[in-house]
Image (cartoon, helix red, strand yellow):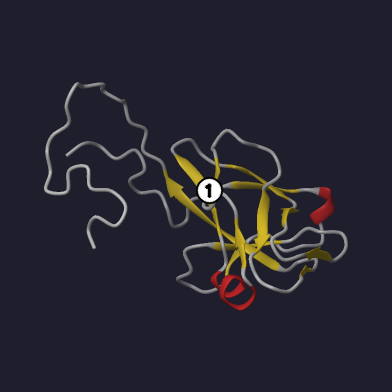
Amino acid sequence: MGSNPTAGLGEGMRIKIKRLPHAKDLPLPFYATEHSSGMDLLAAVEKPLVIKPMERVLVPTGIALEIPPGFEAQIRPRSGLAIRHGITLLNTPGTIDADYRGEIKVILINLGSENFVINRADRIAQMVIVPVIKVQLEEVEELSSTERSEGGFGSTG
């Protein structure tokens, strides 16, 4: 068993957050319930933002983070927006690297059939902080054989 550099981290771990000027009146990201995995991110829009069907927009959250090395923030869709309105994220999960210090912005797309309005402080996505494992690639001529082998999309049923 190797040593785990993230052992003992997690609950109670502190991450520095900067609230940007256009979000001074907004709450910081928060866990909606005691056992939520993701923190809700809020829209830091100045005025209502209409997303037309099949349109994508970049929505500011008004926050920046200092994520410790060995971790990333993953930005994920909110299931309620997806099922009720067809609102989801492009490039999901979005990755916020430990060395990024700019504003977190969310790429939303409307896959629904009606316009959708994002208002200031609406919950638009969720953010999960997760450990990242760095690996070293070793180039080889052959890979070990498995039952599945090169069976790809749909090969397991």
Q: Nearer the viewer, residue 106 or 65?
A: 106
Residue 80 percent across, percent down from the top left = 58, 75
Please name the residue shown 59% across and 53% down the image. 90
Instruction: Return the residue found at the far right.
Output: 47
Quadrant of the frame with the C terminus: bottom left
Percent coordinates x, y for residue 134 in the rendering: 37, 33
In the image, 5: left or right of 15? left
| Residue located 78% across and 48% down the image | 20
Residue at figure coordinates x 72%, y 58% from the top left: 55
The correct choice, above or below, for 96 with respect to 12 in the image is above
- Name the residue: 22% across, 58% down: 156
Above or below for 82 versus 106? below
Picture quarter containing residue 154? bottom left
The amino acid type found where label 1 is placed reads Ala
x, y percentage for residue 42? 70, 62
Side of 4 relative to 80 (left or right) = left
Q: Secondary structure at mark 1?
A: strand
Q: Position of residue 140 (x, y in %)?
A: 21, 22
**How many numbered circles does the render carry?**
1
Q: Nearer the viewer, residue 118 or 54?
A: 54
Q: Along the line of sight, which residue is nearer the eye, 32 or 82?
A: 82
Q: Nearer the viewer, residue 20 or 50?
A: 50
Question: Which residue is labeled 1 in the image?
Answer: 73
Q: Residues within 10 Å of mark 1 (few under 14, many from 20)?
A: many
Q: Is residue 68 above or below residue 52?
A: above
Q: Quadrant of the N terminus?
A: top left
Residue closest to the far bottom: 84
